[in-house]
């Protein structure tokens, strides 16, 4: 989903959550600037590694669910 000049992996508009799945291709980018911009637009940014998503998916889903409930 495009937000500003970036395309994020997943986003919810209500509540405003961005989920980013990071892999080695993200390491060359200035993720701090990207995160600050998204937060300035009112988004809560959740970042997970590819490894977390593939080996701990239940925990990742739980974090996203809890965050959505807190922000709702």
Image (cartoon, grey):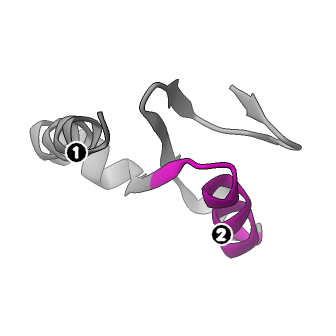
Q: Which residue is mark 2?
A: 27
Picture coordinates of residue 67 (x, y %)?
A: 26, 45
**Mark-to-mark CA distance, 1 and 2:** 29 Å
Above or below — where is 37 with respect to 64?
A: below
| Figure check: 44 above or below 7 | below
Question: Which x, y percent locates residue 31?
Answer: 67, 68
**Residue 61 in the figure: left or right of residue 22:** left
Residue 35, x across and y down, in percent: 63, 63
- Horizontal placement of 39 versus 21: left or right? right
Within the magenta stretch, is there residue 40? yes
Q: Secondary structure at mark 1?
A: helix
Give the answer, above or below, for where 41 lies relative to 72.
Answer: below
Q: Residue 66 magenta-drawn?
A: no
Q: Residues within 10 Å of mark 1 (few under 14, many from 20)?
A: few
Q: Residues within 10 Å of mark 2 (few under 14, many from 20)?
A: few
Horizontal side, residue 51 vs residue 20: left or right: left
Which of discs 1 and 2 lies nearer the camera? The answer is 1
Magenta-tinted stretch: 30-45
Question: Where residue 54 sits in the image (x, y, percent)?
Answer: 26, 40
Mark 1, residue position: 70
Q: Quadrant of the N terminus?
A: top right
């Amino acid at each position: 989903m495009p937000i500003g000049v970036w395309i994020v992996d997943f986003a919810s508009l209500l509540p405003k959550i961005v989920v980013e799945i990071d892999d080695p291709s993200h390491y060359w980018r200035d993720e701090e600037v990207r995160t600050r911009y998204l937060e300035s637009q009112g988004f809560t940014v959740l970042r997970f590694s590819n490894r977390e998503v593939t080996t701990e998916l239940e925990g990742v889903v739980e974090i996203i669910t809890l965050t959505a409930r807190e922000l709702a």
